[in-house]
Image (cartoon, coloured by chain):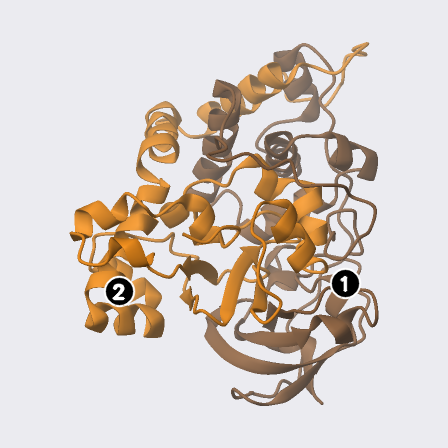
Chain colours: A brown, B orange
Amino acid sequence: MDGMHDLGGKQGFGPIRYTLDAAPFHAPWEVRANSLYALAVRRGLINMDEYRHAIERMEPRHYLSASYYERSLTGLATLCVEKGIVTRAELETMAQGEFPLAGPAAAGRTNAAEREHYRPGDRVRVKDEYVPGHVRMPGYIRGKTGVVVGESPAYPFPDAHGHGLHAEDEPTYDVRFRSEDLWPGAADSALVHVGVFESYLERA
Amino acid sequence: MDRRDTRQGFQRTASIEQRVSAVEAALKRNEADAGAVLEELDHMAQEQWVPRNGARVVARAWVDPAFRARLLAHGRAAVAELGLELPKHHRHLVVLENTPAIHNVICCTLCSCTAFTLIGLPPDWYKDFEYRSRIVRQSRTVLKEMGLDLAPEIEIRVWDTTADTRYMVLPMQPPHTAGWSEERLQSVVTRDSLIGVSRL
C-alpha cells in the first residue's frame, strides 16, 4: 500500500535529532512493548510481515504522531484483535480508555506467477505496480532501473505472508540504483541499494 | 471474561502504559509462561543485544584477515564463530566494508529494521521520519549535518533494509590503533560507525 510509512525520499522533514550515544529505550514501557511483539513472533502468533503491515495500516495522523514503540504496540494489538486473541472491548476495559487500532487490511497477493532468476550484473526494472496490501517495495524505486549486486537466501514473499496467504520463499536481490535516476536533478549523488523481491522485478 | 465485543464509551485514549499492560494481560492469558519469557526478552534487549557485539566482530576482522574474508563472504556464519546470532528470519548478514574511497551507511525507510542482535536496538534518530525520509535522497547533506563531512570524491553507498537481509558496516581501522590488542580495539568501535553515520 502507498501508506504513510513509505517515507524514503519524502521531502519536508528537517534536521536529524542526532545525539551521540543515543539510548535505545527511554522508559520501561518501551522495553516491554518491544518484548511483547518479540514474544508474539517467537510463539508464532504473528509473523514479521503481518506485524509490519499492521503498523502500515495505522491511520496516517496516528502513525505520524505516535512514537516508534507506540506504533509497534498498535500493530501488535491490532493483530491480537484480528486473530481473536482478545477483543477490542476487552483491551479497552483493561486499559481503562480508548485503544486506537490500525485500519483493516486490503487483499494480499501471492508470488508472481512467472519469475526470472537474476545474477550480479543483470540490469533489472522494478515493475510499475500498485499493490493495495502489504508490499516491501519502497515507492521511490517503482518503475526504476538498477543493477543486481547480490542475492540473498530465499524469504517468504511478504505480500502473501503479511496476509496469511500461502507464501513461497523467493530470492531477494540487492539492487543498486543511482540516486540521480531515482530523483533526477533533485538528490545528492549516491548509490542506493535496496533489497528487492524477485516478484517485483523484470529484466531491463 | 466477557468475550462479546461491546465497547464502553471511554472519553479519552488510554495512556500508553495502560495500553502496554492491556496487551501484556491478553498475551499472558493466551501464553501460560509469557511472564518469564517477557522478563528474558527485556533482559536480552537491554543487556545482550548491544553494540559491543558488533564491536567484537569488527575488532576480529581488523586483526584476522582470514576472518575478515569469511565475514565479507558469509556474515552469519562468521559472526557465529564468535558466538553471536541473528534471529532465524534474518537469513543473511551482509557486511559492508568501508574504504578510503567508499562509505557505506544503512537505513530502513519503510520501518526501522536493523541487525539489532549485533548493533543493538536502534536509537531514536534511526527510527525518526527525518532519517528515514532523507538519508536515501540527501545522503551527503544528512551525514554532514550529523557531523560526518565526507570529501566529495568519496562515493556514498546507502543500503535500505527492505527485506530480511541485515547489514552492518565494517569501519576502517583508525591508523593510531595499529598494533593494539583485539580487546582494546573493541573499545574504539561505536554503534554509529556500525550504522555508518560516523567514521572512526
Judging from the image, mark 2 belongs to the subunit labelled B
* Distance CA(mark 2)–CA(mark 1): 34 Å
Q: Residue at x 34, y 75 (%)?
A: B73
Image quarter hosting the N terminus of chain B = top right
Q: Residue at x 36, y 49 (%)?
A: B118
The quarter of the picture where residue B152 lies is bottom right
Q: Secondary structure at mark 1?
A: helix
Assess whether mark 1 and mark 2 are in contact (beta carbons under 8 angstroms): no
Judging from the image, mark 1 belongs to the subunit labelled A
Image height check: is B1 above or below B77?
Answer: above
The quarter of the picture where residue A131 lies is bottom right
Instruction: Report whether A105 appears left or right of A21.
Output: right
Q: Which residue is mark 1?
A: A139
Discs 2, 1: same chain: no
Q: Which residue is mark 2?
A: B78
State the image coordinates of residue B112 (x, y, percent, origin top left): 58, 47
State the image coordinates of residue A132 (x, y, percent, origin top left): 80, 59
Instruction: Report whether A189 appears left or right of B115.
Output: right
Amino acid tagged 2: Ala
Image height check: is A64 above or below A93?
Answer: below
Image height check: is B137 above or below B113?
Answer: below
State the image coordinates of residue B132 (x, y, percent, origin top left): 67, 49
State the image coordinates of residue A130 (x, y, percent, origin top left): 82, 66
Q: Secondary structure at mark 2?
A: helix
Q: Nearer the viewer, residue B161 or B139?
A: B139
Q: Nearer the viewer, residue A59 or B72?
A: B72
Which numbered tag is attached to residue A17?
A: none
Amino acid tagged 1: Gly
Q: Residue at x 80, y 56 (%)?
A: A2
Q: How many marks?
A: 2
